[in-house]
Amino acid sequence: MTSIPAGDRPVVSQPAKAIQPAWVRISHWINAAAMIVMILSGWQIYNASPLFNFTFSPFVTLGGWLAGGLLWHFATMWLLMVNGLIYLLLGLATGRFRRKLLPITASGVAADARAALAGRLSHDDLSRYNQVQKLLYAFVIVAGIVVVLSGLSIWKPVQFQWLTAMFGGYDLARYVHFICMALIVAFLVVHVALALLVPKSLRAMIAGH
């Protein structure tokens, strides 16, 4: 048998390691769709009993009226809760949260924030988050948990009276729910803007590589 010289042997390319595993991508897009529906229907519900001296335009609400908004909100609530719980459990079980989000230091966040504002923050390695990303992602996970718990305390203040009491009562729970929603919306705006500025990060969340 004639051996093939090493230099003439065909190079077998190895498949690239996924930056975003399949379970991350699937849960991410389900969470994104569910969160958008929850926000728009929540604005419809808010308009029926505003907390502040403004209401949301009908063009950015979902449901058409209070009952319609409630139907959309409650139906999507289960999708968000189940999918979010799966994401949290897998993130903890696989060690992804520990690897991706820790450690977070005040000095690191300040340094990366200054670099980002100066346009010097590198995005070459998408498998590693900078300190600002770590802080924002950790923050939105916590905000998501609080918005769900405060929503449950508003939805069933009698059945979950202990939970409602944790938020200081029904009225304060509404404010907590609204503030968390506003913070999540702000995160989504920044998140989408950064995805457009660094399109390869969007490709990684779609294709994995």
Image: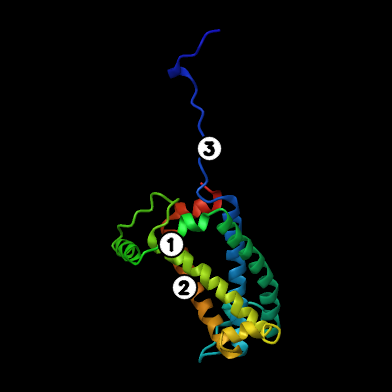
- Observer-side mark, 3 or 1, equals 1
From the image, state whether disc 1 or disc 2 is nearer to you. 1
CA distance for labels 3 and 2: 37 Å
Q: Residue 152 carries which label?
A: none
Q: Distance between the residues labelled 1 and 2?
A: 16 Å
For the residue pair 152 and 60, the one nearer the viewer reads as 152
Residue marked by disc 2:
186
Residue 137 position, x and y percent, is 47, 64
To which quarter of the image does residue 80 belong?
Answer: bottom right
Q: How many labels does the image show?
A: 3
Vertical placement of 19 versus 192: above or below?
Answer: above
Reply above or below: 43 against 18: below
The residue located at (57%, 55%) in the rendering is 24
x 51%, y 72%: residue? 184
Mark 2 closeness class: few <14, some 14–19, many ≥20 residues within 10 Å: few
- Nearer-N-terminus badge (3/2): 3
Residue located beneath label 1 in the image: 134
**Image vertical order of residue 196 relative to residue 173, above or below:** above
Where disc 3 sits, the SS reads loop
Q: Residues within 10 Å of mark 3 (few under 14, many from 20)?
A: few
Closer to the chain start, of discs 3 and 1, is 3
